[in-house]
Amino acid sequence: MQKLQSEQRVRLVVRAYDRCSEVFLVNSDFQRIAAGIGELEAVVSPGIYKARFRIGQKQVDQLVEVARESPERATLEICGDPVDFSSPVPLAGIGAGQDIQEVHRKAAEKFSQLAVSEQKGAGSWLFLFIREITGSAAVPWAGITLHDLDGALVAEPNQGICDQENGYFALHLELDPGTYRLRVEEEPGEFYEMFVQTEAGWQTQVFAVSEQAWLPDIQAHRAALSSAAVLMAEAGQGFTAKDEVARQVELLRLGLLHRRKVVTETFVADLLQQESLHSLNPLQVILLAHSLAEQGKLDTALLTTLLKKLPANFAEHADIQALMLNQPATVRPAFFAPPMLHSSWDRIVQAVKQRKAIIPPSSLAAQLDDGVIKTALWLVHRPDSLEI
């Protein structure tokens, strides 16, 4: 009887709350016995196991008891708890226990859906939301400005909502479609920029948290551009904290940021099938395609299928064009404006070395060179302070 009991095996299926979550299974000897993305399956003996769900640098452990089952019920399915991951975006379901998180959610929804603070052009929209989450009395909007591609000032903090009591800054602009430079002065004369592209009919949303920066004799916080999050919504929709697509875009960003392989073929197939009659969110497609490219799983056929899911006016988006550089083509694009993603920039630089792409000598893209911050997900660079 003892031998028969020890030989019984149970099929264990563990599903994560999010399909882009890493899943691990650990036995009572602390050995990892299975791993997967979104879900895993293992045949195990009765006993106590630990299921671990990881997003970015946050993880949740869940104990699993596998009991002896009758032969016709030898499968156990477990659904994981949501991971309370870190994000600059005040999404629903994260930031548990932080009262300020709910304040930020409501503010982001309100001001992204209201009429614009300033109209600086027509046809595309930009929403900036910078927040302080440490309880510091610092102002999260300090040192931040928005500039056009030539460096001319477009907007500064006094044009938005500066709420020091609740620790946030919100700015909603209508702009001409194009690429803009979001700039932060970290220290006197030391600037950092990221590039933000807006598209006709869409609102680009940039979320960032402030981090401590060094300044002589004072303690100051500045918006952390390297860890910023970018979302997109159709004009008039604004930000919604419970939006599942926004959550998925954030998971894709975190996967790329931490160089985790969080996209599976099944996930891609299901996503395309579910949205067979509709376009996908542009940032969803861009980050998904770059994730697949990082994993070496983006071929010409799949890229073509993904591009068909984009609104037509996104064909010239720099981060899409960068993915096309390794595809058969008769005409190579000229990158007058830098892309948003660092991985796109790497592809452009490599293509230039192979004489496949053109960066016009007089363009901003030609001036980046050594100022690029190599560890950031976004293309963040430090412009020469003498040129500002």
Image: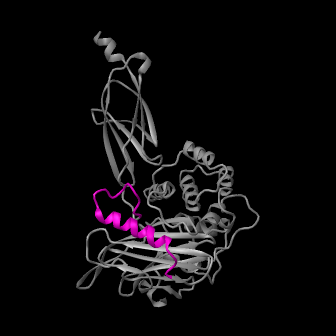
Image quadrant assignment for residue 9: top left
Residue shown at 51% from the left, 67% from the top: 238
Image quadrant assignment for residue 203: bottom right
Q: Quadrant of the N terminus?
A: top left
Residue shown at 60% from the left, 44% from the top: 269
Residue shown at 69% from the left, 54% from the top: 304
* Highlighted magenta segment, given as a residue range: 89-117
Residue 373 at least partly seen: no
Residue 343 at least partly seen: yes
Examine the rendered structure and indicate whether residue 184 appears above or below residue 308: below
Residue 87, given in percent of the width and then of the height, sits at 39, 61
Residue 303, given in percent of the width and then of the height, sits at 65, 54
Toward the right, the furthest residue is 330
Question: Left or right of 147: which side holds 220?
Answer: left
In the rendered image, residue 101 lying in the magenta stretch gets the answer yes
In the rendered image, residue 97 lying in the magenta stretch gets the answer yes
- Foreground pick, 37 / 371: 37
Question: Left or right of 17: which side holds 3?
Answer: left
State how the image is colored. one colour
- Foreground pick, 296 / 235: 235
Examine the rendered structure and indicate whether residue 178 appears above or below residue 296: below
Residue 161, given in percent of the width and then of the height, sits at 40, 80
Residue shown at 59% from the left, 49% from the top: 297
Examine the rendered structure and indicate whether residue 186 appears above or below residue 276: below
- Foreground pick, 58 / 136: 136
